[in-house]
Image (cartoon, rainbow, N blue to C red):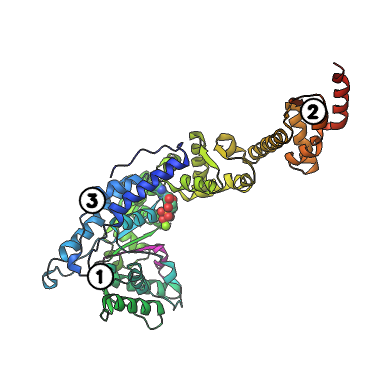
Amino acid sequence: MTKPAFDPEKSIEEILNLDAEEAQANAETIGDKPGVTGKKASEFNFDIKPEELESFLNQYVVGQEETIEVIATKVCTHFNRMNLDSKIPPKERLVGNIKSNMLLIGPTGVGKTYIVKLIAKKIGVPFVKADATKFSETGYVGGDVEDLVRDLVHEADGDIRKAEYGIIYLDEIDKIASTGHMYGPDVSRSGVQRNLLKLMEEAEVDLKTPHDLASQVEAAMEAQRTGKVSRQKINTRNILFIVSGAFSGLEDMINKRLNKQSIGFEKSKVAGEARQDILKKVKTEDLIEFGFESEFVGRLPVYVVLNELDEEGLYKILKNKYSTVVLGKKLDFRAYGIDLSFTDESLKLLAKKAHSEKTGARGLLSVFEKVLIKFEKSLPSTAIKKLTVDRQVIENPGEVLRELLIEEGIQSFQKEFLVEHGIYLDFSKEAVDRLKEMAGERLKSIKQLCNDLFRDYFHGLRLMKLEHFTIPREAVDNPDDYLNSFIKENYSK
Ligand SMILES: Nc1ncnc2c1ncn2[C@@H]1O[C@H](COP(=O)(O)OP(=O)(O)O)[C@@H](O)[C@H]1O
Ligand SMILES: [Mg+2]
């Protein structure tokens, strides 16, 4: 799939056109290529190669190349294996085969969810995302982990076969690690781990739960669609589980282990290392130490550690042609007919600000909001149709907006005056400065103030047969006196 080059300075129409094309391309190559094409498992069809998925992901995701290499490979292998297995009679399949369920470790906003969503979109399998915390509270009775599997059926529009080749993504998995106590929340956390473990391996999940009306409706729909009574169970053998978390504190456990191993050697070597580099040395025993049951970790054969995003990475995200941060903001303004553009310098500054928020790419969104919210509020009720975000806008948004509104107020008054009276009123720089002060003192908009002061100027100016007149500072302070003396001085000439 080759795509036209993106230029962030392109007009919004061009960008939108490009997106329309892209959406079409995606519809052809992604949406219409569902992993499961038929109702029978034997028709499961998957033919994406690791490198194809890898380069697809790298188009969107910044700074996670090593991680993506592993994820893309294991995801493809998983689905290609399912493909192969579906052609082998069940009795001849390997017993105790462990599938490539994955653990992603990384702080917030570095692309964990993004990567998994992109994968599900690309390969067109049903996808469910949830936070493990929702299962970890003591006494929580409403839902259990099996609901995730039923949710997959819902995502697959009731098609159980399709759901059986889906992806379940569980975030905040570190919150179901136990801390070693034998009471309280820990008991339920270990319980959640054990329940998940069963699903991650192979389990049969009842489609209907007595308390869940939605799944019963789902079953009824399936029956209606296929004309027969639907199957009641979903097998999880082929479902891919991806779990993730920030795992704060894990690096200390890894460090402790490394230090223990290197007693007498260079103990200090790990001290100054970046967190992500320590995490990359994670081993099964560290995860057990962190609070996971060994059987649970055993069902997660693939670990990857995502990189933190530095300023440069955040800037690259902004420049990425698929980045929804810039495009989303452009569309927000476009909704009011305003063309928003960004100088390259402004994007660098935004990336810098976002980096200091320490929430990865999420910081980008909040920084954009902070800088632009006042413009987004005020510009729609003006005639301003274009805003270029540059260094000044970012460093001093309030001041820039005020200037813009003043300029716009004056222009708007000038325009109306010209249309109504055929006279072009100009303002000296000093006059503008005085108007600004006065607008502040009287709490009026510049346009209103100009109207109050100069509405009647056309009588005198017509008398003088003037088509162009520049208003000086004195006129702002005493409009009537100034005009009268001007007429007296010049009429006789
Ligand atoms: N590495 C990245 N490359 C490009 N965009 C990213 C990256 N990381 C995050 N983003 C953007 O930030 C948003 C939030 O990131 P997300 O994947 O939800 O982070 P988390 O790691 O907390 O799951 C994504 O939807 C995406 O737009
Ligand atoms: Mg997330």
Left or right relative to 250: residue 463: right
Q: What is the crowding at mark 1: few (fewer than 14 residues within 10 Å), some, or many (at least 20)?
A: many
Looking at the figure, which quarter contains the C terminus? top right
* Closer mark to the observer between disc 2 and disc 1: 2
> What residue sits right under mark 1 in the picture?
161
Foreground of the two, 95 or 116: 116
Mark 2 lies on a secondary structure that is: helix
* Label 1 within 8 A of ligand 2 by Cβ: no
Q: Position of residue 32 (x, y in %)?
A: 28, 57
Q: Looking at the figure, which quarter contains the N terminus?
A: top left
- Residue at image position (85%, 19%) is 490
Q: Earlier in the sequence, mark 2 or mark 1?
A: 1
- Using the rendered view, name the quadrant where residue 487 is placed: top right
Tag 2 near tag 3, CB within 8 Å: no
Which residue in the rendered view is the most extreme toward the bottom? 210
What residue would you read off at disc 2? Answer: 462
Between marks 1 and 3, how big is the CA–CA gap?
A: 24 Å
**Regarding mark 3 in the picture, which secondary structure is present there?**
helix
Q: Please provide percent x and percent y for residue 428.
A: 74, 26
Q: Viewer-proximal residue, 246 or 127?
A: 127
Badge 3 density bin: few <14, some 14–19, many ≥20, Cα 10 Å: some
Find out whether the residues at labels 2 and 1 contact each other: C-beta distance under 8 Å. no
> Amino acid type of disc 2?
Arg
Question: Which residue is labeled 3 in the image?
Answer: 50
Relative to 284, is 337 on the left or the right?
right
Secondary element at tag 1: helix
Label 2 Cα neighbours within 10 Å, binned few <14 / some 14-19 / many ≥20: few
Tell me the distance, in whole angstroms, between the alpha carbons under discs 2 and 1.
Answer: 83 Å
Q: Is residue 410 left or right of residue 360?
A: right
